[in-house]
Image (spheres, rainbow, N blue to C red):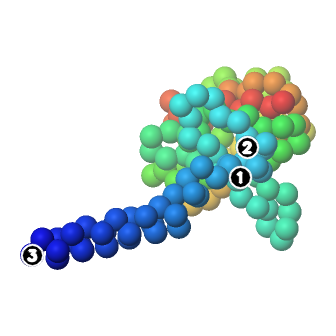
């Protein structure tokens, strides 16, 4: 009986050792360099996923709206990079530059001016319409700075994009 217990313990140690050799070395692998160079998060934030663009186009960072708010709530990108805002909440999503309800912070024009035809004009940071769950809106940030935004449909959902 003692030999049987010793044999079982040795087999278990062998299995654990093989598992560690096979999978343990991956735990310290460096992070995806595209993620590390494309976006930086502030402390405590989850990193924004990076998605390759359609048809081989440029990659973009993703901010997701859930019923709990925007994730990540702060995202840093380089000027010229695109952020995709995806609605995974149970309500509509209309991303608009702060301050609510005028959306003037990004370029100084108000919602009534830059959304006159239902679409943002002159590259302003305003979605100008609400989208449902599963839909998204892409915006390419050209200006450097720190830009607060909110969900115009639920203004308590807020976030910040920092553009270098």
Residue shown at 66%/23% (left/top)? Answer: 99
> Considering only vertical position in the picture, is 58 above or below 12?
above
Residue 98: name its quadrant. top right
Local crowd size for mark 1, using a 10 Å CA cut-off: few (<14), some (14–19), many (≥20): few
Q: Earlier in the sequence, mark 2 or mark 3?
A: 3
Relative image position of residue 116 (x, y in whole percent):
79, 40
The residue pinned by badge 2 equals 36
Dot 1 falls on a residue whose secondary structure is loop
Which is nearer the eye, 2 or 91? 2
The residue pinned by badge 1 equals 32
Residue 102: name its quadrant. top right
| Residue 147 marker | none
Quarter occupied by the C terminus: top right
The residue pinned by badge 3 equals 1
Which is nearer the eye, 84 or 4? 4
Residue 132 appears in the picture as rendered: no
Residue 14 appears in the picture as rendered: yes
Question: Circles 2 and 1: CB distance less than 8 Å?
Answer: yes
């Amino acid at each position: 009986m003692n030999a049987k217990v010793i044999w079982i313990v040795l087999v278990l140690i062998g299995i654990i050792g093989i598992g560690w050799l096979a999978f343990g070395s991956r735990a310290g692998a460096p992070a995806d360099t595209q993620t590390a160079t494309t976006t930086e998060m502030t402390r405590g934030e989850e990193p924004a996923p990076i998605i390759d663009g359609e048809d081989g186009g440029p990659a973009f960072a993703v901010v997701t709206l859930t019923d709990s708010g925007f994730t990540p709530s702060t995202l840093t990108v380089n000027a010229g990079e695109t952020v995709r805002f995806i609605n995974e909440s149970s309500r509509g999503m209309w991303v608009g530059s702060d301050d609510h309800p005028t959306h003037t912070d990004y370029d100084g024009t108000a919602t009534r001016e830059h959304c006159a035809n239902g679409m943002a004009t002159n590259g302003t940071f305003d979605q100008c319409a609400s989208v449902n769950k599963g839909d998204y809106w892409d915006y390419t940030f050209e200006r450097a700075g720190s830009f607060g935004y909110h969900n115009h449909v639920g203004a308590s959902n807020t976030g910040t994009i920092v553009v270098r």
